[in-house]
Image (tube, rainbow, N blue to C red):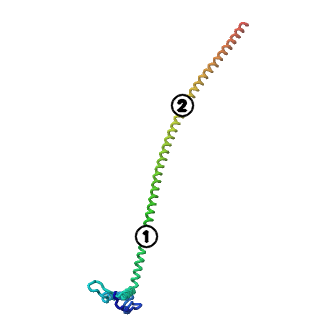
Amino acid sequence: MLHQESISLETQTVTNGVPPQSGLTAQQTQGLALQQQLQRLEEVIVLDGLKLPLTQRTIVDEEQLLSQLLAVERSIPDTVRAAEDILKGKEEILSRAHQYAQELIKSAEQRAAQIADELTIIQQAEREAQQLQKQVQSEVEALRQRNISEVERARRQTQQELDAMRQATQAECEQIHREADLYADRVLKDLEVQLGTMLKVINNGRSHLKKSA
């Protein structure tokens, strides 16, 4: 490979080869220096390079090319580097934001699933409560009907017992009345017998008295 003599490139520490110009900001000065170094890089490749006949290739001094590339790199403004850092930071922030968003989505999905499970449990509990309420109401109604039936049966039984007691009492009263009549009849009959006997004694006594007179 052919090499041409390297051309020394003079650079200044502040302006990267661009003499200070009044009225330009530091960023404008750095931008102008970068533009000049890029133009010089083009000259190194196009003008200083050795073009091979009958081809599209050019032989360039490697040392000169590397030196010019280094000069271009040094001429890149700090704002460009800062922009690259910001871009990297932005990508990192976007990556973190994406990761955070995924975590939020996952957490939201888990919470939604938990809420759905809790809602299912609540709905199941409500259905069971309604079923239990219906069962209790049915049992209470059945108990009320049973109590009504028992009360009615007890009332009929009590009425029957009262009727039986009234009939028994009436029969007993009639029996007592009959027995009282029989007792009175016997007493009167005995009294009649006694009175008859006494009457005979009286009559006999009177007859005896009459005979004695």
> Closest to the observer: 155 or 204?
155
Residue lying at the far front in this picture: please name it.
1
Describe the element under mark 2 as helix, strand or loop: helix
Q: Residues within 10 Å of mark 2 (few under 14, many from 20)?
A: few
**Which residue is tagged 2?**
163
> Closest to the observer: 89 or 44?
44
Q: How crowded is mark 1: few (under 14 residues within 10 Å), some or many (20 or more)?
A: few
Spot occupied by residue 115 in the image (x, y as percentages of width and height): 45, 60
Give me the C-alpha separation between circle 1 and circle 2. Answer: 94 Å
Residue 146 lies left or right of residue 54; in this view the side is: right
Spot occupied by residue 201 in the image (x, y as percentages of width and height): 69, 12
The image shows residue 132, relative to residue 119, as above or below, that is: above
- Label 2 is placed on what type of residue? Asp
The image shows residue 132, relative to residue 209, as above or below, that is: below
- Label 1 is placed on what type of residue? Gln
Whether residue 31 is visible here, answered yes or no, is: no
Describe the element under mark 1 as helix, strand or loop: helix
> Closest to the observer: 117 or 211?
117
Residue 1 lies left or right of residue 186; in this view the side is: left
**Which residue is tagged 1?**
99
Report the mark closest to the observer, 1 or 2.
1
Spot occupied by residue 78 in the image (x, y as percentages of width and height): 40, 84
